[in-house]
């Protein structure tokens, strides 16, 4: 068990870099278009934290959208907004990225939302590696 903990900074940094590369690859092979919000689906996110936040549940409204792909075919998708509620109403147009090989796999075109998790993982990984090797 101790051996696994010793390598935790490197593992965290490696996983963060892999996730970052996957997100970059996903955005490079995606196409941008506008989609119409047709409904919302609620999901619950358990908040991780300390003190008052520990164990709380956050309700998030994920938009359901319809859009046309590069061939003019209609698709619908549920956009995962993570922990953020977007400020849109039914009938509003939102910018989305969709995978050309699988248009039903769409995401909100919000680069801060897309790259937030890998950026945090890489940053914490780098910090942990620096602490480990400079201490």
Image (cartoon, helix red, strand yellow):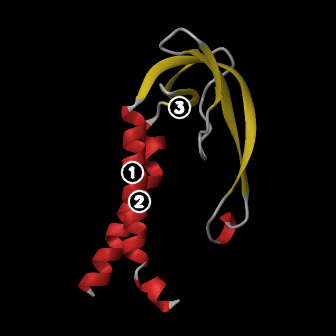
- Between 78 and 111, which is closer to the camera in this rendering? 78
Disc 3 packing (10 Å; few <14; some 14–19; many ≥20) = many
Q: Secondary structure at mark 2?
A: helix
- Please determine whether, in this image, residue 58 is positioned above or below residue 1: above
Q: Secondary structure at mark 3?
A: strand
- Between 71 and 119, which is closer to the camera in this rendering? 71
Measured as percent of width and height from the top left, residue 103 is found at: 55, 25
Which residue extends farthest left? Answer: 134
Residue visible at 62% across and 71% down in the picture: 50
Return the disc, 3 or 1, that comes first in the chain's sequence: 1
Cα–Cα gap, marks 3 and 2: 21 Å
Residue visible at 67% across and 35% down in the picture: 62
Q: Are marks 2 and 1 in contact (CB under 8 Å)?
A: yes
Is 133 situated left or right of 15 in this image? left
Measured as percent of width and height from the top left, residue 71 is found at: 50, 10
Per the image, the residue denoted by label 2 is 16
Residue visible at 52% across and 16% down in the picture: 69
Q: Secondary structure at mark 1?
A: helix
Cα–Cα gap, marks 2 and 1: 6 Å
Per the image, the residue denoted by label 1 is 20
Disc 2 packing (10 Å; few <14; some 14–19; many ≥20) = many
- Quick one: quadrant of the C terminus? bottom left
Per the image, the residue denoted by label 3 is 108
Count of residue discs: 3
Measured as percent of width and height from the top left, residue 45 is found at: 69, 52
Measured as percent of width and height from the top left, residue 114 is found at: 46, 42
Residue visible at 57% across and 18% down in the picture: 35
């Amino acid at each position: 068990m101790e051996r696994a903990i010793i390598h935790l900074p490197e593992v965290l940094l490696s996983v963060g870099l892999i996730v970052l590369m996957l997100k970059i690859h996903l955005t490079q092979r995606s196409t941008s278009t506008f989609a119409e919000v047709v409904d919302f689906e609620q999901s619950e996110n358990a908040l991780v934290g300390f003190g008052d936040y520990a164990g709380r549940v956050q309700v998030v409204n994920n938009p359901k959208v319809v859009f046309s792909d590069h061939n003019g075919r209609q698709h619908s998708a549920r956009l995962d907004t993570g922990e953020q509620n977007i400020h849109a109403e039914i009938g509003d147009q939102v910018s989305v990225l969709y995978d050309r090989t699988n248009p039903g796999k769409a995401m909100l075109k919000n680069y801060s939302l897309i790259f937030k998790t890998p950026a945090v993982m890489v940053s914490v990984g780098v910090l942990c590696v620096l602490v480990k090797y400079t201490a």
